[in-house]
């Protein structure tokens, strides 16, 4: 749920990552803070979750639904190509929304 390798830590800081739409940010934002994260990266969520982030004392970054989901698809395709020799082509067709 939080990324391919779980929670990411760097130089004493931790970030929670949820690609695409964070469907339950009222739970995910406080959970990330409780686990010691200071930043929650997601594609999109409700702007009403501003107060959940503020109350939890955590930064929230909205990276865009499409952009946060395509990274994983491209990484999986590259892995399958390299590991099994299958042909992979990523077709970038953002909706612009």
Image (tube, grey):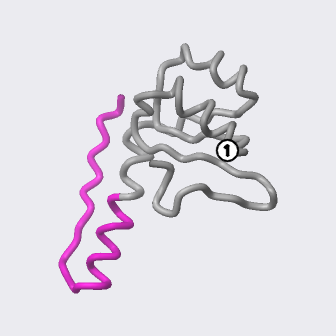
Q: Quadrant of residue 79?
A: bottom left
Q: Is residue 77 above or below residue 50?
A: below
Q: Quadrant of residue 90?
A: bottom left
Callout 1: SS: loop
Q: Which residues are magenta?
A: 73-97
Q: Is residue 82 magenta?
A: yes
**Where in the figure is residue 47, as x and y percent of width and height?**
54, 17
Query: What residue do we see at 36% from left, 52% from top?
Result: 70
**Where in the figure is residue 34, as x and y percent of width and height?**
68, 38
| Towards the viewer: 57 or 21 | 57
**Where in the figure is residue 1, as x and y percent of width and height?**
44, 48
Q: Is residue 55 magenta?
A: no
Query: What residue do we see at 29% from left, 69% from top?
Result: 77
The residue that mark 1 highlights is 35
Mark 1 burial class by Cα count in 10 Å: few <14, some 14-19, many 20+? few
| Towards the viewer: 66 or 16 | 16
| Towards the viewer: 31 or 70 | 31
Q: Quadrant of the C terminus?
A: top left
Q: Is residue 83 above or below residue 18?
A: below
């Amino acid at each position: 749920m939080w990324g391919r390798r779980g929670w990411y830590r760097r130089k004493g800081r931790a970030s929670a990552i949820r690609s695409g739409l964070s469907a339950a940010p009222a739970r995910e934002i406080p959970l990330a803070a409780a686990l010691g994260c200071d930043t929650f990266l997601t594609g999109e969520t409700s702007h009403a979750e501003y107060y959940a982030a503020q109350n939890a004392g955590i930064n929230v970054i909205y990276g865009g639904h499409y952009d946060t989901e395509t990274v994983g698809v491209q990484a999986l395709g590259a892995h399958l190509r390299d590991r099994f020799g299958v042909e992979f082509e990523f077709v970038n067709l953002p909706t612009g929304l």
